[in-house]
Image: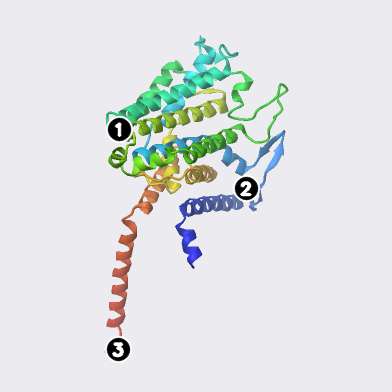
Amino acid sequence: MTRLRALTRHRLFFPLVCLLLVLLLNVVVTVATTGSPGPFFQISLTNGALNGPLVTILNRSSELVILAVGMTIVVSCSAGTDISVGAVMALSGAVSIWLLGFGELKDNGYHVESYVVPYAVGLLAAVAVGALCGAWNGFLVSKLKIQPMVATLVLYTGGRGIAKVVADGQIDKVDVASYKWLGNFIQDADGHNLMPIPTAIFIAAAVVAVTAVVLRRTALGMNIQAVGINNKASRLVGLRSNRIVLVAYIFCGACAAIAGIIATSRIGGIDANNCGKMLELDAILAVALGGNSLAGGKFSLSGSVIGAVTIQALTTVLYSINVSADQLPLFKAIAVIVIVVLQSPDLKPLLQRAGGVFRRLALSAKRAGGPA
């Protein structure tokens, strides 16, 4: 009983239970459509690439995992969310493609057939743009003391507009084969896959690993939690809380840029209207689903990663039962409400009081119904 109680109180228990329930729901849908649970767990090697529902879920959740990592740091540090990450994805991707083609505008937008600057320069430019957007958000939050959601609302509305201006309002395309490597598979000159696992999974794993090492091997992780728990107290003990918050938002912006690179690489271009659209809600949901308090303080990167994979698995099963893309935000919003309510510190005492009332009513009814 003691071990079971310790297990249920572990911070990853709730995220893992949610993931298992969603995977079980996927299995049920698979059985209903195919008559067997086998196809959901089936992984095959075709043309040097691993294929299967589980691989697809991990692959498609890569951008969200990266966004969730950055969002986790921001939430823990500032007790607020960055709702501009989707727009920053679009802006970073648009700037990268514009720079790679160096503004070669054609009748139907930018059509990059060869790199004008090295590919690495385009990638670094995208990350720099994302970090610059994060620095702007961090300045508003840390220096001007604007509420995080209000501060990031500026880029939430304006960032995508700037991306459309950079892309000239068109869907820009890149026809260079190497541009699609980061969002798909790395290939040789003959088009054969050099690795069976999608590149985006490696990028997401690298971001998570590097972030975890930095936060655990340095004092940064502890300082972020200290600032998130009590900003004023952290300043009194000598921590530069404003600088820590600024660094957190810069990191979140850089993560959004990396996610934007993957998203544009998947389709070989940029659609500023749809790139990263509504992913800010998914990132916030992943953080909450991972057992992290939206009020700031202690955080769990592993929980956020599990939350991101869970959301992608939920998206997969919703599409499987013919839920349209326009209806997805409704289901995710309901999930956010449920998770926030379950994490409320007042919920347990409220349930205990309600349970006490019901027990007293049951006891009174039992006494009233007894022999005179």
| Above or below 248: residue 303 | below
- For disc 3, the neighbor class at 10 Å (few under 14, some 14 to 19, many from 20) is few
Amino acid on which disc 2 is placed:
Phe
Q: Label 2 neighbourhood size at 10 Å, few (<14), some (14-19), many (20+)?
A: some
Q: Disc 1 designates what residue?
A: 150
**Nearer the observer, disc 1 or disc 2?**
1
Mark 3 and mark 2: Cα distance apart in space: 59 Å
Q: Are marks 1 and 2 in contact (CB under 8 Å)?
A: no
In the current view of this chain or complex, which residue is farthest to the front? 238
Q: Amino acid at mark 1?
A: Val
Let me know if residue 185 appears in the view: yes
- At horizontal 43% and vertical 32% (from top left) the residue drawn is 252
Q: How is the image coloured?
A: rainbow
Q: Nearer the viewer, residue 160 or 127?
A: 127
Label 3 to label 1: alpha-carbon separation = 65 Å
User: 188 or 372, which lies in front?
Assistant: 188
